[in-house]
Image: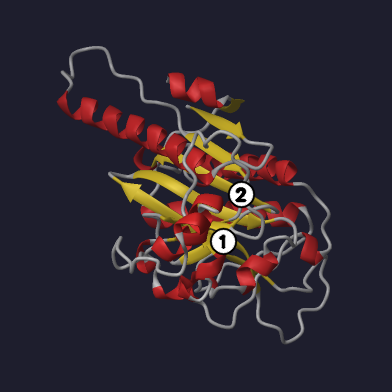
Amino acid sequence: MRLAHIHYPNLTSFTRISQLQQTLTTRLLTHKKLLSSADTTTTPIQPPDPTIITFTPHPVYTTGRRDLPPSNTSPRDTTTTPRDRESNPNASNNTCLSLPPPLEKIRPLLIPPTPYPPPPNHAPPTQKAEYHPTLRGGQTTYHGPGQMVAYTILDLRRLGLTPRCHIRLLENSVVDVLGSFGVRGLITQDPGVWVHHRDHQGEGQGEELPRKITAVGVHLRRNISSFGVGFNVTQEPMWWFRQIVACGLEGREATSLAGLGVDVDVQTVAGRFVEAFVRRVNEDFAGPSGKGEGIEGVYSVTEEDLLRG
């Protein structure tokens, strides 16, 4: 089995990634359906390769299943005039959003999802974030500039993974990436990967609570996974995290590699994450002691390649 990896080097639309992710998960689910109805005497149907998407979106707050809004309805906006709405379409958009309680206090920051492809001459507004409800596990988090987001679209059974093992695989892959930069990652009872803020190359931990450096949230359907991790590389996401109670953990702070004194770019972190993921799969879940297939190699693909199937 080989692993496809697509990396978006520039800021990209979260809607664009969501659409690609949906295409890939549907392809894997369709393959499973074909297998269940296929004649076992015919030539085996080759499964699609697993895929990792690494990217950095324009600012976006996403909610998981535990924080989904109560409905898609909200009071009509009565604070803007038709002229206001014509000159500034976003003037009324945020009041039309159905938000979960954790995001009500930042309603002025939020705008609806931008369609992809975007309208002609569209430019993402500054100091605004799109709001996207999703079906991943967990609660509210932020993604945007300064983050490496990695979505893994794969068949857990083919890799010999249980849902719990899948989460631990993602967390351990992040811990391995942190270790490659001399940072000790922590897996605790709280979701995600954590670090002691001053714990770089063995320096003191003090009494400070660990800070989150990576959020983890996935969705499973018939053992097909989607979504993944949001890894803080620079300090850019910190302001956005301070506007919310990230992942429902009151009083807990976030940090980044840059906050720990590590100067590195998102693309480098993306590459190391994919390498760590493959190494963990092969060492922990494949081979004589494991139940899953190993990953023989990684190949780079374009969006056009993936959409062609």
Question: What residue would you read off at disc 2?
Answer: 58
Q: Is residue 155 above or below residue 133?
A: above
The answer to which of 86 and 165 lies nearer the viewer is 86
Q: Is residue 23 left or right of residue 171?
A: left
Q: Quadrant of residue 258?
A: bottom right
* Picture quadrant where residue 205 is located: bottom right
Q: Residue at x 79, y 74 (%)?
A: 198
Colour scheme used in the picture? secondary structure
- The amino acid pointed to by label 2 is His
Specify whether residue 168 is in view. no
User: Label for residue 177?
Assistant: none
In the image, residue 143 lies at what x, y percent? 58, 56
Residue at coordinates 35% horizontally, 20% vertically from top-left?
A: 46
The residue mark sitting in front, 1 or 2, is 2
Whether residue 234 is situated above or below residue 38 in the rendered picture: below
Placement of the C terminus among the 4 image quadrants? top left
Residue reaching furthest bottom? Answer: 207
Disc 1 to disc 2: CB gap under 8 Å = no
Which residue is denoted by mark 1 in the rendering? 142
Of residues 294 and 71, which is closer to you in this image?
71
Measured as percent of width and height from the top left, residue 237 is found at: 67, 62
CA neighbours of label 2 inside 10 A, class few (<14), some (14 to 19), many (20+): some
- Give amino acid for label 1: Tyr
Q: Nearer the viewer, residue 111 or 20?
A: 111
